[in-house]
Image (cartoon, helix red, strand yellow):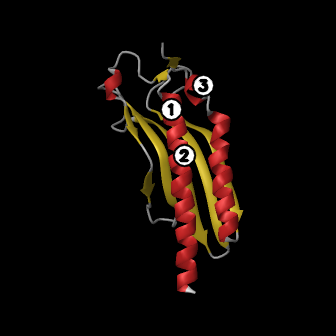
Amino acid sequence: MINAVSAGMGTILSALHEASGKVERVFMDIAFGYDISVPGLPDDEVTYRGTYLWYPEKDGTLTFHCLEIQLPWRSGDVSNVPSEIRLSISVRPHEHGFTIGAALEVDLVTPLHNLEAGEHQIMSRAEEQTTVAGAVAAIGRCRDAFAEHHGLFHHIGFLPRG
């Protein structure tokens, strides 16, 4: 039984890693076509972080952050936390199977272009699956759901490059 569970989670983690890498590559290619910057601040202070695994242990959810873009902030802003754009795919195993999720979030300390300060849930998706095969298929659907948001940077108000 333990070997079957381990093999199943290995299959799911492999699918998550592959899906998050694809989302990262696609959105990085799109981001390079835009001037991702905060007006009045140096654009070289924008940081990009590709696929990484995050496991906070509080509820057992494993999250692959496909892409995280941190924007610089002005001294005197109300937060020590930078504004961020986050794309992620996750799995939470439970007694009846798996919850597969995907999220696209924009969290702004101050207003930026077309968005007000605050948390903006651009996309949130969750699917319940009872089998490993179903979880892998759901991961693929979550990956594909990001395609509906290729206009993200335009939506925020970043200008196309050159």
Q: Amino acid at mark 2?
A: Lys
Residue furthest to the top: 162
**Badge 1, how many Cα within 10 Å: few under 14, some, many 20+?**
few
Q: Amino acid at mark 1?
A: Asp
Taking 143 as reference, is 4 above or below it? below
Taking 73 as reference, is 85 above or below it? below
Label 1 to label 3: alpha-carbon separation: 16 Å
| Residue 142 or residue 96, whichever sits in front | 142
- The residue under label 2 is 22
Q: Residue at left 35%, top 22%? A: 43
- The residue under label 3 is 155
Between disc 2 and disc 3, whose residue precedes? 2
Between disc 1 and disc 2, whose residue precedes? 2
- The residue under label 1 is 29
At which x and y percent is residue 17? 51, 56
Quarter location, residue 144? top right
Q: Residue at left 55%, top 27%? A: 153
At which x and y percent is residue 122? 61, 37
At which x and y percent is residue 75? 29, 26
Q: Amino acid at mark 3?
A: His
**Badge 2, how many Cα within 10 Å: few under 14, some, many 20+?**
some
Q: Residue at left 41%, top 16%? A: 39
For the residues bearing labels 1 and 3, Cβ distance under 8 angstroms:
no
Between disc 1 and disc 3, whose residue precedes? 1
| Residue 8 or residue 63, whichever sits in front | 8
Taking 113 as reference, is 130 above or below it? below
**Badge 3, how many Cα within 10 Å: few under 14, some, many 20+?**
some
SS state under label 1: helix
Label 1 to label 2: alpha-carbon separation: 11 Å
